Amino acid sequence: MFDLNIASMVSLGHLHSHDEGETHAIGVALARVLVAGDVVALEGPLGAGKTCLVRGMVEGLGLPVAAVSSPTFVISHEYANDESTPLVHIDAYRLSGPEDLETIGWHEMLRSQEVIVAMEWPSRVAAALPRRLIVIQFTHAGEHERLLSLAAAPTLVERLKAADWPPSVLARRVNCRICQRPVETTQPTFPFCSERCRLADLNAWFTERYRTSRAAEASDELAD
């Protein structure tokens, strides 16, 4: 979890998405327990599924899903209709700091509590985030699998616990990425069975035994 300097955040455990469809379904379930004024911070690497989850949130709110894309180059998109709470989708990837949020009226947005906010790359503007916050950290757990770690401000915990998550994402056990031993999602080293396996995985990246198939390109940000 990126450092928010908020000691009172409560961990809500993990959700295990096996593909894009399940990530989308998590977004749908999440949206149905959100209310105007909620801010959802989505942190994770390129291609982790952050925008896919936002599409699910838009669907769960009854807003136009077809229009959803990553707002990397325009900072924010708003999705609204006459029946539902609007959702503002923010991508902070290209922002240099919290002060850049003022170009989209960030503080007025928070004060009005008229919209739901989903923000990608929140670590780039962490100092501007409110204490009443939901955080979802995305971690790769396989080629198509993702681990979503949830945390929230104490006042939001009971509402999130009431979310109707897809049963398939509530699996409590997977295999360690290094040794294939079973590992519980509640273990501090998850998705590895031990600190030793976690370090072995890190070493594989440092020694270039793991390689990306190609260099990251700007267009990849739009396909997250």
Image (cartoon, rainbow, N blue to C red):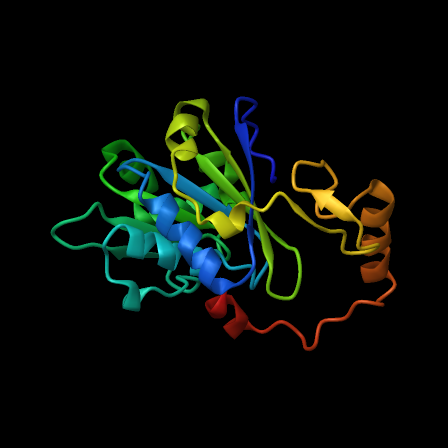
Q: Is residue 29 above or below residue 76?
A: above
Q: Quadrant of residue 209?
A: bottom right
Q: Quadrant of residue 25?
A: bottom left
Foreground: 155 or 190? Answer: 190
Q: Residue at x 45, y 36 (%)?
A: 134
Q: Is residue 56 visible?
A: yes
Q: Where does the N terminus fall, quadrant-wise?
A: top right
Foreground: 8 or 111? Answer: 8
Q: Residue at x 29, y 49 (%)?
A: 87
Q: Is residue 72 above or below residue 126?
A: below
Question: Could you tell me residue 135's position as x and y percent?
Answer: 49, 39
Please count the marks in the image.
Answer: 0
Q: Quadrant of residue 79?
A: bottom left
Residue closest to the far left? 82
Residue closest to the far bottom? 214
Question: Could you tell me residue 109's position as x and y percent?
Answer: 28, 40
Q: Is residue 121 visible?
A: no
Q: Residue at x 46, y 27 (%)?
A: 153
Question: Could you tell me residue 195's position as x and y percent?
Answer: 83, 41
Question: Could you tell me residue 187's position as x and y percent?
Answer: 71, 36
